[in-house]
Image (cartoon, rainbow, N blue to C red):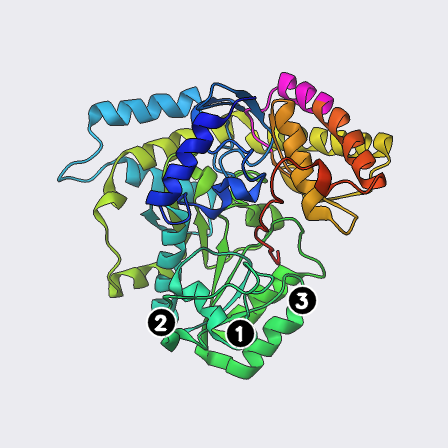
Amino acid sequence: MDTSKGQNLYQRAKELIPGGTQLLSKRPEMFAPGQWPPYYASASGCRVVDLDGNRFTDMSSMGIGSCLLGYADPVVNKAVIQAVQDGTMSTLNSPQEVELAELLVELHPWADMVRYARSGGEIMAIAVRIARAASGRDRIAFCGYHGWSDWYLAANLSEGDSLDGQLLPGLAPVGVPKALGGTIFPFHYNVIEELEEIIAQYGNSVGVIVMEPFRYQGPQDDFLLKVKEIARKNGSVLIFDEITSGWRHHLGGVHMKLGIEPDMAVFAKAVSNGVPMAAVIGKRAVMDSAQNSFISSTYWTERIGPAAALAAIKEYRRRDVPKIVGETGSAVHRIWKSAAEKAGLALAVEGPPALSHFSFACNNAAALGTLLTQELLKQGILGNSAFYASAGHDEKALQDYELAVNTVFPKLKRALDEDRVEASLEGPVAHKGFTRLT
């Protein structure tokens, strides 16, 4: 498999773009350095063609979770093309942003108002700004991953590297003002005592509690109910970050399925199936505080994002996409478990079917994971130990994946048994990725 055109371009990119890419999760070094195709020429459904003409079935993250309908969905594409033809920008506002707000509020009856941005990181910054304005307090308690902004990375300004385990261990918050130290404090998912300790120590100076309501594990012992009650008693604004969980588990946010209403909920990624768009919804008493702050940007008024989101959400509802991706994810779970059992490979599968991963029970799991990706590439599969199910994964994709996994898993087992995992690699071991606490 020739990947020279893509690899050469990536080497050039690293001379021009710090880090080589705009997103850490898309760096080839996170998968199989020197082997993972850095760029795509085209993508449709769940199939990708790289710059060298190699064809792959994507059984990994589907655009880092953004393409829940699959790549280049025709319904969303049609809406985007129409938006382009009608003019993407004007001195006047796009009526689609009102229609989208009405749809989001309809799907989330607890919410009253909506604000927009075009990416997950910036919509989280907006949500936190509004919540701080509403509470009149600076300090934040958080659980999980919430982006790259100063408000979040300030956790690592404190002693002990608070983001170890939440983001990248040892992450240096270079460029984050030191004055933000002591404004944000982490707690682990399903460990309510840690949040209680934060509130006990900092009390009514904690104006915001922000967390992912669900990722690979769900709430235990009424965890989310307890978080909500703590927020209510302390007068803190509760934000659910549904950037990843939204739409794939339930039409709207997973919090709807869990029966827990926050004060605000944040969406991006799948809300528009790969087109830049993001939204925060919330209760009027909280959201109205946005008018007391300055939150404004020209490109938050363009037409394409809202048009894509409207089309995507309507398709999620029409096709019952959460059910589809749940069934697809369950099929992949069965493939993993069956192939591992046949190969005698120790495997632990975690997470709900729509968004899951597995881990190897061995000391050199990172090298074995890189070997997995390397060998899947040879089978025409973009894959690692995580899988984001989408409605673009058809029966042929599942059949091809099952064949590939049943071909690769025995190779991994033999490499383990013969103590030649590292020797089997055709490049360096993949870099360590995010370690989350949700």
Q: Are marks 3 and 1 in contact (CB under 8 Å)?
A: no
Residues at marks 3 and 1, CA–CA distance in whole angstroms = 18 Å
For the residues labelled 2 and 3, say whether their Cβ atoms are less than 8 Å apart: no
Q: Residues within 10 Å of mark 1 (few under 14, many from 20)?
A: few
Whether tag 1 and tag 2 are in contact, CB under 8 A, the answer is no
Asked if residue 31 can be seen in this view, the reply is yes
Residue 137 in sight here: no
Q: Position of residue 100 (x, y in %)?
A: 35, 38
* Magenta span of residues: 389-403
Between label 3 and label 1, give the one nearer the viewer: 3
Relative to residue 4, is residue 356 drawn left or right? right
Which of the two discs, 3 and 1, labels the residue nearer the N terminus? 3
- Residue 233, label in figure: 1
Is 394 covered by the magenta stretch?
yes
Amino acid at circle 3: Val
Task: Find the residue positioned furthest to the front.
Answer: 423
Mark 2 is on which residue type? Pro
Q: Which mark is residue 177?
A: 2
- Asked if 58 appears above or below 117 in the picture, the reply is above
Which corner quadrant holds the C terminus?
Answer: bottom right
Q: Secondary structure at mark 1?
A: helix
Q: Which mark is residue 191?
A: 3
